[in-house]
Image (cartoon, rainbow, N blue to C red):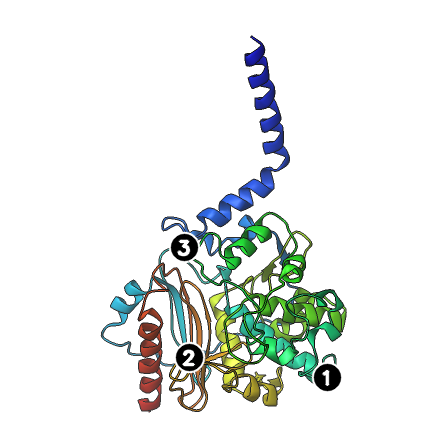
Amino acid sequence: MRVLKYMLGALVILSALALWKREELMRLHAVVTLFDEGRIVQNFSRMDRLFETAPIPVSGEVTRLPEGPPLDLPADWQDWLDRRAVTAVLILRDGRVVHEAYHRGTGADDQRISWSIAKSYLSGLFGVMVAKGHVDNLDAPVTDHVPALKGTAYDGVTIRNVLQMSSGVTFDEDYLDFWSDINKMGRILALGGSMDGFAADLQDRDRPAGEVWDYVSIDTHVLGMVLRSATGQSLPDLLGEHILGPLGTTGNPSYITDGYGVAFALGGLNLTLRDYARMGEMFRQDGRFRGRQIVPAAWVAESTTPSARTAPGQLQYGYQWWMPADARDGEFLARGIYGQYVYIDKQSGTVVAVTGADLTFRESGAFDDSLQMFRVIAAMNEEAP
């Protein structure tokens, strides 16, 4: 009887804990099952129901993307859509929509998760804040703006190092390893922990800052910390006022946040496909959109030019933007895990915005498969009358 009482008491305590931590447990479950094959497409359109989010305030008129003559798609188009589990794609030719389609049950109003496309948005915002004088020296240590990082792995790392993903900070980016740093960070986010605290807890560097490029997503969070400190504003407010509002963003854009309301700067934007295309078109036009200079042209050029010390023959990197290893002038892209892309080719006037749920995105050849398709489309644009 006594044992039964203990068991009943333990059950009551566990039930109470479950109720008390219900929201945190639900978010943890969301993280664990986020990429399940049967859930991934729907999950990527409903991140606001799975995580803490903050609305991004936007004001002004929504800008329409004008229509152009429909594009004759490549013969293997459907095969590519299937291989890459594409959920939506929009193609612009000289600013006009020549193809827009939604697949796998998604729709035009879906707020799709950006993943690391968010890094390129933050790069554009950073350029605006540099032009406004909030950040006046890219070669200053990040600790000049964020004293909380003194004594951490980021002590002595410059803002430029972080923009180029060359901080040297030890960070395991393996999405398929449950115990990797990137997945530990995801669990902290889901359980309401502090992203700032996570960054400040990093103590080790693999190599001196600036020596070698190494993709470290937490670097982007540090950029966000710099901007928040330099301006005294939150990232949702800054991005809404200086980037999304001027672009005429649609719907209800939002950022995933940690438990302290701090934006998940490195991958937490939720926007429509047309919004991603607008950003690409703005960068294609050297920071201008609908006659308004949004991001300084000099920053667009600098941020999308290879400058990080990447390995020869590999993908190149600027300030939170990618360039193919053999990129021609004006060819660059934003990209995120599971098949998110904004591809820009200035010479052909091409922008391709893609959202996906590609569970094989890490396999050899997956990126090249998409890049080749984007280049085929760009070539078709060049050949068009």
- Which numbered circle lies on residue 337? none
- Which numbered circle lies on residue 315? 2
Type of the residue with mark 2: Leu
Q: Is residue 201 above or below residue 121?
A: above
Residue 148: % across, % down: 74, 65
The N terminus - image quarter: top right
- Which numbered circle lies on residue 136? 1
Dot 2 or dot 1, earlier in sequence? 1
Type of the residue with mark 3: Val
Q: Where is residue 325, by image quadrant?
A: bottom left
Dot 3 or dot 1, earlier in sequence? 3
Residue 362: % across, % down: 37, 64
Q: Residue at x 72, y 72 (%)?
A: 143
Mark 3 to mark 2 CA distance (whole Å):
28 Å
Q: Is residue 297 left or right of residue 382?
A: right
Crowdedness near tag 3: few (<14), some (14–19) or many (≥20) residues, C-alpha within 10 Å: many
Residue 171: % across, % down: 53, 64
Crowdedness near tag 1: few (<14), some (14–19) or many (≥20) residues, C-alpha within 10 Å: few
Type of the residue with mark 1: Asp
Dot 3 or dot 2, earlier in sequence? 3
Mark 2 to mark 1 CA distance (whole Å):
29 Å
Count of residue discs? 3
Foreground of the two, 25 or 167: 167
Residue at image mark 3? 41
**Mark 3: secondary structure:** helix
Crowdedness near tag 2: few (<14), some (14–19) or many (≥20) residues, C-alpha within 10 Å: some
Foreground of the two, 11 or 47: 11
Q: Residue at x 58, y 74 (%)?
A: 167
Q: Residue furthest top?
A: 1
